[in-house]
Image (cartoon, helix red, strand yellow):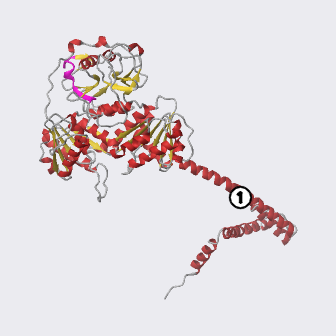
Amino acid sequence: MEQRPGAGARARYWFDTTLARGTSALVGWLVLVCLAVVVPASAALVWTSGHAPATLSGKVAAVWRLTGETMRLGGTTGSPARVALSVLLALVALVYVSTLVGLITTGLTERLIALRRGRSTLLERGHVVVLGWSEQVFTVVGELVAAGANQRRSAVAILADRDKTAMEESLQSKVGPTGRTRLICRSGPSADPAVLALTSPATADSVIVLPPDASRGDADVVKALLALRATARGGDVTVPVVAAVRDSGHLLAARLAAGSRGVVLESDTVTARLIAQAARRPGLSLVHRDLLDFAGDEFYPAAHPSLAGREFGEALLSYGNASAVGLIRGGVPWLNPPARTVLEPDDQLLVIAADDDTAEFADCAPLVDERLVAGPRPQETRPERLLVLGWNRRAPLVLREWGRNAPPGSVADVVADEDEATVRAACEGGDRDEGGDGDENGEGGDGSDWTCVALRGDTTRPETLAGLDLASYRSVVVLGQEPRAGEPPEEPDTRTLVTLLVLRHLERRTGRELPVVTELTDDGNRPLAPLGPGADVIISGKLIGLLMAQISQNPHLAAVFDELFSAGGTQLHLRSAADYVLTGHETSFATVVAAARDRGECAIGYRSHAEAHRAPGYGLRLNPPKADRRRWSEGDEVVVVAGEGRRGAVRSGGLPLPRRTPRG
């Protein structure tokens, strides 16, 4: 038998139904509840007062006055008409005051909500605008804060389609104190010109467009660049713009949208080049990271009219605390020009220094000890063996970039949980894309003779790597595997970390430390990676963020980094100190610079073999004073800017700035 609801349930249902009738019902209940409390309390106060009226009518009038004063109803006594008019006036005043308070409260609330959402227009000049949100935003903002540390006042505006408060909290926790730099967050889609105008891009020093983490991020970058054009007067962006795309298919569209003053990086190509260079020259990633980080030494233009008419080779020894690496002629950087290049009056030297105003002019030629300069040694070119563990979309680019400068007969073994035909086809297709004649063996079409061997296997299993002759490889590259279609996504870098654990296990068994180059996606996983001190770790997003921050502060550096990170031509090298000075003797760094000059190179630092495993520098010292003296050992290395030497420059279209061959 169905049980009927009780009296309490029916009362609650009746009450809820009454409230659902609207505002009038709410007001009525409020009046009744107030009267039910105020009237009995007022009566109790009157009846218990020692000065209460003697008559009942007097007591009722006293109760009414007290109730009226409590509820702001006037409390006037007398004829019913006077009482009614008193109540009417009190109600009018109450409605007026309540409405006024409500309007003020609503206006303030809407204003606070608008400010919380970040929808107010910036009134800034000379600031940096960052469009988009990804893991790179923390690197970019952190570098911009470091760059503005010596400025009296600077600002960075971040526009992303995220909650403003959430962005501010994330930046505060990951970037930390910002010093004199103010971080201003605005919320909204960067592809909307009306929202983009909130950041005042026309008055900014530069605009940085970050690629989102999503797969369709390149399309969002192009749309943001088009929105930037829509906000500009005449449709022509007049401020420097730095953007990045992953897929080369969007590169041309992004360059066209960025305009004549825009620089668009192809992040996958740049990352692949850095991995390939580190694979051929272990420890080079430390140099890249130091030069890209505003906390260390960077590239700066320096003008010294007194050097006009003198040769570039003399300028190499004309700074005591800076390292000259090239010159800027006609607005175009020229790295490592011939030593006999005569400097023109309008030339600027390109130097590596601690800051843009710290390069001090000094004659360091007397510091050179010609007796300790090493004579030329025969250079042996032997075939190299490279081991690549894992596969992703950048793997063909890494192999192609490595193969460009690999000696003839070199071999790249690829071990991945990927079809062998897919790996071989990707290697061959990468060579043909550059206009080569890649053959069925995976030999490069750029004139090199190297072979790509595909081996299928799971790199996270010890038995897969145990059968390899790890001691025969010059270096090992560990790439992160991307999730495949239809498979659930896993935590970034999980397979990479497991593969590194297996490698460390095999290193202990063989007693040989392998030069490993590791690609990580998340910078937070760097402390978890089981690697030796000073190992080469390429965190693609962080390096691209550092590169974008550097170019945003000095657009001339786009061509400089394009040359340094290219597959041929002028690059950064780590070479034996015995090629420059006699080991076992103490001499100044100026002697090393002079020896490198005689070889057609620019020495910018060194890496001490004895300190290669000591944090935080791992033996690397960039831009040491020319007067510094040390005893050079056989294992020490010198950091130089030089041509590849084996073949001429090979351009592969990384950064979009055009270059011409300077006169010399």
* Res 610 seen here: no
Q: Position of residue 6 (x, y in %)?
A: 56, 81
* Nearer the observer, 283 or 383: 383
Q: Secondary structure at mark 1?
A: helix
Judge the density around disc 1: few (<14), some (14-19), many (≥20) Cα neighbours within 10 Å.
few
* Nearer the observer, 196 or 345: 345
Q: Quadrant of residue 349?
A: top left
Q: Does residue 103 appear to the left or right of 58 in the view shown?
A: left
Q: Does residue 216 appear to the left or right of 509 in the view shown?
A: right
Give the amino acid type for the residue marked by disc 1 in the picture.
Ser
Whether residue 575 appears in magenta in the rendering, the answer is yes
| Residue located at (57% from left, 45% from top) | 120
Q: How many marks overall? A: 1
Q: Quadrant of residue 243?
A: top left
Q: Does residue 216 appear to the left or right of 338 in the view shown?
A: right
| Residue located at (25% from left, 40% from top) | 434
| Residue located at (52% from left, 39% from top) | 234
Whether residue 628 appears in magenta in the rendering, the answer is no
Q: Which residue is mark 1?
A: 98
Q: Position of residue 251 (x, y in %)?
A: 36, 43
- From which residue to which does the magenta span run? 569-585
Q: Position of residue 421 (x, y in %)?
A: 18, 51
Residue that extends furthest to the bottom in the rendered view of this protein = 1
Relative height, residue 618 to residue 100 (above, below): above
* Nearer the observer, 100 or 203: 203
| Residue located at (59% from left, 75% from top) | 12
Q: Position of residue 16 (x, y in %)?
A: 60, 73
Quarter placement of the C terminus: top left
Relative height, residue 222 to residue 580 (above, below): below
